Image (tube, rainbow, N blue to C red):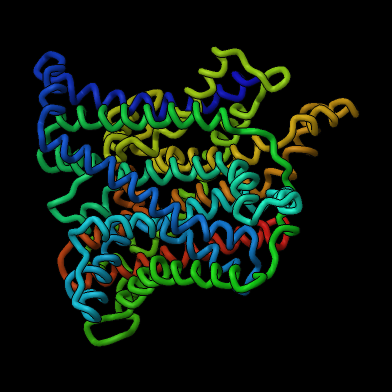
Amino acid sequence: MRLGLMAVPLGFFALFFGYPVAAITARGLHADGGWQLARIAEVLGDPDVLNVLWFTVWQAAASTGLTLALALPGAYVFARLDFPGKQVLRAVVTVPFVLPTVVAGSAFLALLGRGGLLDELWGVRLDTTVWAILLAHVFFNYAVVVRTVGGLWAQLDPRQEEAARVLGAGRFAAWRRVTLPALGPAVAGAALMVFLFTFTSFGAVQILGGPRYATLEVEIYRQTAQLLDLPTAAVLTLTQFAAVASLLAVHAWTVRRRESALRLVDASHTAHRPRGAGQWALLAGVLTVIALLILLPLAVLVERSFSGPDGYGFAFYEVLASAEESGGTFIVAPLDALWNSLQYAAVATVIALVVGGLAAAALTVRGPRGKEPTRTGRLVRGFDALLMLPLGTSAVTVGFGFLITLDEPPLDLRASWFLVPLAQALVGVPFVVRTMLPVLRAVDDRLREAATVLGASPLRAWREVDLPLVRRALLIAAGFAFAVSLGEFGATVFIARPDNPTLPVAVARFLGRAGELNYGQAMALSTILMVVCAAALLALERLRTNRSGEF
């Protein structure tokens, strides 16, 4: 049964990830009629490359720790507290996740750079510093922790922690011994995703770090697009790939050992109004963090989209109405990119849900009495790690790989619109798996066994037992897949057709051209993308199954 469930995800990843990445890497290392294997030692021995690798690792670790420290209280607030505006705020904190990194980096530059808000108020500049990069990474990844950890936290039975307190444990001790171990897999999964995203960070580092700081992703782009040094880019890609694969293997092994069945309840019974000064203070602190790190940069985008040459108005939005008036940047009107993005994201979400859902189901199949042979356990851990590799692989590499491999029959997709959703789904699948996996693994097998004893078929047992518990997680996964598809830029910029650009590609084209008009249109398109994302996520909030569900 497990192998049957794994067949589709394995085929999808082999065809649309493994094959393109291997092909572009091999082309980079195979030059002048032979393999340039000596180049590997030469590149890895370069002190400049070692400095880039070291910075990539430690800034990703620091970003992950800072994001967890600031977002875990938010996960608790959204999971266990009920307050006015909760639905809207939950959608808003996810908006940064879909914004192109170049746009969000520009917003932080307006806050932290020369002439920015901090510079005007206190004469402080943080651009070209590590702090600007770390804060931007928290901005991007705050929702990952809130959604992933909060989704499970909302379904944990609070009576277990209350029972520990009745037996004499203090509030913190009860949380540490009961709730924290139950949340461990979800926290580890969220931390892994944050680390991978910051490990492969590109736009934020390039804009905010200046020439002083570069991650592996930035260096791969520089070697490929600027220096045309494909062998060096290939070595850096392999290095990044090996580091990510090792991390995923360790994660899959350690988390698998800590997982166990949990008692899950309806989230509508766990959320309540804040009680006591401590919970009110926690709510105030979380709202302050959200206001400063998320709402303020978004407000800068909106303000700049209305700030025209003749004062505040809709001048930039009016110019977006036609391709001719916007300076010939597009074959089609820039606003048509909105419709393209929605279509691509919808198709990519369906693909990600099918592939990721089957993969998550395969990872939750247990052997007799919950035990598995050693060989099967290794297969599962390897499969789990494989699903996360797209998050840690250079988007530049994936995009170029698509162009050189999917252009001949029977996979002649280079001119097809379907190529874009396929690339976007690669990034969406890991979020579907990481969101659904903690909930699926927390379902007690005895519930399925009881349904089978009562005469239910496997399909009916899944429909009656698993689906009611995981459908909220499924909606969360759909929201994440849709959001990341809307904002995916790295691979899409290489494969999107000129007559069918997405919103992030349109924004990048405007930012790449000089002039106040182009910059203003970029800010206007970014604001439209932000509003569309917030509306889509709020609609998913309305589709949730109860009053306080995650979606």
Does 82 sit left or right of 500 as displayed? Answer: right
Does 332 sit left or right of 366 as displayed? Answer: left
Q: At which x and y percent is residue 106?
A: 26, 64
| Residue 340 seen anywhere in this rendered image of the structure | no
Q: At which x and y percent is residue 146?
A: 52, 55
Given residues 29 and 404, the one toward you in this image is 29
Given residues 268 and 337, the one toward you in this image is 268
Residue pushed farthest right?
454
Query: Would you place residue 522 above or below residue 49 in this image?
Result: below
Q: At which x and y percent is residue 156?
A: 68, 49
Query: Would you place residue 358 above or below residue 95 in this image?
Result: above
Does 251 sit left or right of 62 as displayed? Answer: right
Given residues 111 and 131, the one toward you in this image is 131
Residue at horizontal 39 percent and vertical 35 percent from the top? 390
Does 7 sit left or right of 453 as displayed? Answer: left
Residue at horizontal 47 percent and vertical 50 percent from the top? 345
